[in-house]
Amino acid sequence: MTLSHAKACGFTLSIILGLGSAAAQAADLPPPAAPVAPVMTSAWTYRFTPYGWLISLNGNQTVKGRTARVDASFIDILDASLGDGGTLFALMADIEARNGRFSLLGNFAGLKVSVDRGGVRTRSATPDIAGAIGASGDAKTSMAILEAGATYEVARFGSVAFDILAGARYWNQRAELSFDAGATVDIGDLSFRRNVAIARSGSVDWIDGFAGARVRIGLAPGQEFVVRGDVGGGGSNFSWQGIAAYSFDFAEKNGITYSGVIGYRALYADYAQGEGRRRYAFDMLMHGPVVGLSLRF
């Protein structure tokens, strides 16, 4: 074998050995990592707030053409409700689902309100009902108020946000007025219990549309002050609502932030239907402090 042939064979052997070594090293390398799927997160956040409304009433309630003027504080209503074996409220809750500037609102209030003769100031009847109305008597109203709507943030300046809002409010009521039967002349269309004549309305319901605005103010981390107002009508002649509330975070667990809520709510409706003995009317301002617990997630 010539010298040139030997060099060529050595060069070839070196290439083979090098390729084998590279292949062995490649075999020892870990396999390439599998592509990681992107984590999908929802842009929606939710807030659920059960609350109590310490309600007072000021206005007129008309059932079967008989009208009672009601001026009762929360203490008056509480005494009358508990004394009658009833409850002041059954269930109240507020919910909001937010995605960026847009949010959906929902609110439910179920109330059973009793006002005794101390909170019923005057009583009267429509002109076509003869006779006088007895001086004594109570007023009772059971109602459910269901609200649904949406808001949109139109402006923000630092920690202050301005929203516009619109929606609808559904009302369902059953009312009862009682009078001293001995002093009531025309009571042929009423029910009786002992010496008391009772006017019962049956179920009455209506829907109001509403529109308004809301201001949200971040006072400090975990603290917010909210003021809301709206006006409406449709089923009723006119309605309005005003709410002011302060919330403060106090705990966080398992992705849920817990906040206390204190504030004040006022809701007014002027609704009427029918004439004479068939007339039903609810011209009432309901207002009082609000206390609740908010869960945000």
Image: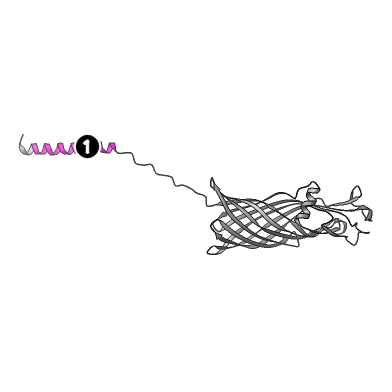
Q: Is residue 10 magenta?
A: yes
Q: Residue at x 7, y 39 (%)?
A: 4
Q: Amino acid at mark 1?
A: Ser
Question: What residue appears at the point 93 percent right and 55 percent down from the top-left corner?
Answer: 183
User: Of residues 243 and 156, which is closer to you in this image?
Assistant: 243
Residue 256 at least partly seen: no
**217 to 23, vertically: above or below:** below
Please determine whether, in this image, residue 285 is positioned above or below residue 143. below
Residue 161 lies within the magenta run: no
Q: Quadrant of residue 217?
A: bottom right
Give how far across and how far down residue 266 sits, in percent. Answer: 71, 60
> Position of 164 compared to 80: left or right?
left
**Circle 1 Cα neighbour tier, 10 Å, few/some/many (<14 / 14–19 / ≥20):** few
Which residue is nearer to you in this view: 227 or 205? Answer: 227
Task: Report the residue at 63% width, 62% height from top.
Answer: 227
Q: Which of the 4 quarters of the picture holds residue 211?
A: bottom right
| In the image, farthest residue toward the top | 1
* Image quadrant where one finds the N terminus: top left
**Residue 271 place in picture, x, y as percent:** 77, 59
Q: Please, which colouring scheme is shown?
A: one colour
Per the picture, the main secondary structure of the magenta-coloured stretch is helix
At a point 19% along the width and 38% down the height, the residue shown is 18
Res. 196 visible in picture:
yes
Label 1 sits on residue: 21
Mark 1: which secondary structure?
Answer: helix
Residue 273, horizontal then vertical, whole percent: 81, 58
In the rendered image, residue 213, in percent from the top left (x then y), is placed at 63, 63
Is residue 52 found left or right of 24 in the rendered image?
right
Which contiguous range is marked in magenta?
6-35
